[in-house]
Image: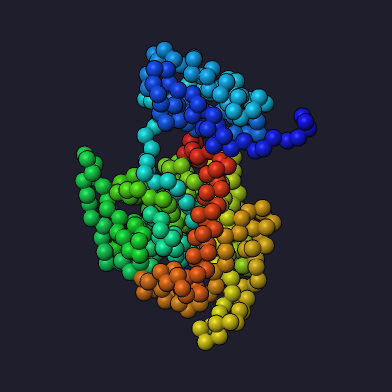
Amino acid sequence: MSDIPRKLIVPKNITDALRTVKYPGSEEDLVTLEMPQEIRIAGNRVSFSLVFQKSDDPHIETLVLACEEAIKKYVGEEVEIEDNIAVKFIHDMERPVLPNVKNIVAVASGKGGVGKSTVSVNLAVALANAGKKVGLLDADIFGPSIPKMFGAENDRPAGVKIGDREMIEPLEKFGVKFLSVGFFVDPESAIIWRGPMASNALKQLISEGNWGELDYLLIDLPPGTSDIHLTLVQSVPVTGAVIVTTPQDVALADVIRGTSMFQSKSIDVPVLGLVENMAWFTPAELPENKYYIFGKDGGKNLAEKLGLPFLGQIPIVQSIREGGDYGTPVAADSESMTGAAFAEVARNVMHRVHIRNIQLAPTKKVKITRK
């Protein structure tokens, strides 16, 4: 029997075990009290923080031992938990920037020109069509295109006071709340900012946006890798990244670099999968025809090679370009061919986020240390 491998340990196994531990003198368990945080699992090794209100709490040692016993009993004797519970206190825990946002998804690309912003906008609309509460933040500081794609170039977000804070009220169209630096600059002028200015602009849109409750906040990143990417992962815990590519080899080579950035040890953001945009050309008068002008299945094959989920293919059709130019995203019409394609990508993204949240602990903000 000892040779039979045990099932994979996931965070839910740990929280279910810790629900059996009550705080002394209370009927509430530790999970209900939100005391276990930062759960990490590596094989049989389990670690997490146990957060107390006060540093002189008399039950610290008792509860740490009770947690160890509960995990051994309900998860398995082979779990390595001894000395892996870090005691912390509420004043040590940083207040979350977006406490009411369930999932933050970065939409990225290795290079420009692959339709990343088009995918971001239509994915957001498709998620909203699926009944989700969705926000979209245009983090492409030097080339903001979200206002145009939503037909909101002449609109300006209003200020709103929430408690003692001055916040920015996102605009909303097609069920999607959205903000962009493009709302605060002259659209006819080039944005010439040094790195710190661009990073500060992004942090302001994140922290001062009145996003409210969201199931998904999509972040449309600039192409490649830059200070903006680093600022994002330092500012908020990113649930996962969606990588957009086209089928041709020159785009695929850049995907590998972009993917490796998120998967690097210092960043450690899960890649939810790849979207292949411009997968084929279909003329309106010949809807059954497919012309693979950039190559066939390049993104699909690369996803398989890299061991990443493949989230779907989006064709080139005139309506996508028109929707972007005229402010009516094609995903708004879920019955159309392109609308159905984006609806499939949205379903796959929701599924991958669900799987990610079951199997992995919440992502933590990146802390960069300089020696």
Can you give x and y, in whole percent of width and height, for residue 124 in the image? 43, 60
Is residue 92 left or right of 367 when viewed as pictured?
left
Whether residue 158 is situated above or below residue 35 in the rendered picture: below
Can you give x and y, in whole percent of width and height, for residue 351 in the image? 54, 53
Q: Nearer the viewer, residue 62 or 93?
A: 62
At a point 55% along the width and 85% down the height, the residue shown is 286
Can you give x and y, in whole percent of width and height, for residue 174 in the image? 35, 65
Can you give x and y, in whole percent of width and height, for residue 193 in the image? 37, 53
Q: Nearer the viewer, residue 292 or 198?
A: 292
Quadrant the N terminus occupies: top right
| Residue 2 picture quarter | top right
At a point 61% along the width and 79% down the height, the residue shown is 291
Whether residue 328 is situated above or below residue 179 in the rendered picture: below
Number of dots carrying numbers: 0
At a point 42% along the width and 31% down the height, the residue shown is 32
Residue positioned most to the bottom:
285
Say how the picture is coloured: rainbow
At a point 53% along the width and 74% down the height, the residue shown is 316
Q: Nearer the viewer, residue 358 or 281?
A: 358
* Residue 130 visible in the current orientation: yes
Whether residue 2 is situated above or below residue 163 in the rendered picture: above
Q: Nearer the viewer, residue 183 or 278?
A: 278
Whether residue 8 is situated above or below residue 212 in the rendered picture: above
* Residue 112 visible in the current orientation: no
| Residue 266 picture quarter | top right
Residue positioned most to the front:
27
